[in-house]
Amino acid sequence: MFSLLRKHLFPPRCLICSNGEGVEDGVCIECRSRIRFLPEPVCDVCGTSLGTPGTCIECLSRPPEYDRMLSVCVFDGLIQDVIHRFKYHRATVFGKFLAKLVYRSVTEKGIRPDVLTFVPLHWSRIVLRGYNQSALIARDLSGYMGVDVRYGILHKTIKTPSQVGLPKRDRERNLKAVFSARGVEGKSVMVVDDVITTGRTAREVSKTLKKAGAKHVFFVSVGRTAS
Ligand SMILES: [Zn+2]
Ligand SMILES: [Zn+2]
């Protein structure tokens, strides 16, 4: 009753442009039309855009540790801006909007895990930032999917410098054996990340989960950098 009244008196405004038209999860229809979705078809293992449906040559010749990796949007323009504000400027209001994008995509692909979790940050970075952006997306995604989010599955045991701006070889060295996992024996686990850049984190996290006994690992992200 009160929420209906509030909606009538203060119609929701877009969190990005303040427009009031077709606002859903805080974002208006005009801003949503500016999102660039990853072009279909995508590889049914690594989620990279392909010319034809199926599995890409890299995944066929060297199957990755995860069972499936899926991203929703190209990481540029509006989505890049939103994720940046969400991650570094405490714009946690975008959590539901980003989770809904992932939710639509995983539902469409028929991916159904037993549990949800997220790429962990080292505790010192959480202290600094105050929150883990991927955990917030996972929490809202859990509500949409009706699948529990588990907080203690993955840990980041060693603090690594930020991956941004590092050459590829250093980035790979940078991530060796920094994750640990527990409580996933026989389970299908979905790991949420905000952006996938090289896919290295996804492979390391998935390897750790499989070693700990996970049956399936699905890795999902809102954005993916064009590579
Ligand atoms: Zn807008
Ligand atoms: Zn592939």
Image (spheres, rainbow, N blue to C red):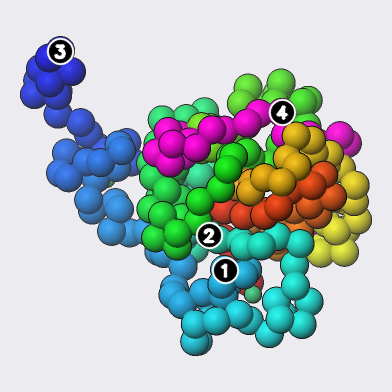
Q: Earlier in the sequence, mark 4 or mark 2?
A: 2
Q: Position of residue 91 (x, y in %)?
A: 46, 31
| Residue toward you, 83 or 44 | 44
**Kind of element beneath mark 2:** strand
Q: Which mark is residue 47?
A: 1
Residue displayed at 71% across by 21% down? 127
Q: Quadrant of ligand 1?
A: top left
Which residue is label 3 attached to? Answer: 2
Whether residue 15 is visible, yes or no, is: yes
Whether residue 80 is visible, yes or no, is: no
Q: Earlier in the sequence, mark 4 or mark 1?
A: 1
Instruction: Determine contact: label 1, label 2, CB under 8 Å.
Output: yes
| Residue toward you, 209 or 97 | 209
Residue displayed at 85% across by 58% down? 172
The amino acid marked with disc number 4 is: Gly
Q: Earlier in the sequence, mark 3 or mark 2?
A: 3
Which residue is label 2 attached to? Answer: 71
**Kind of element beneath mark 1:** loop
Determine if the magenta segment contains residue 149. Answer: yes
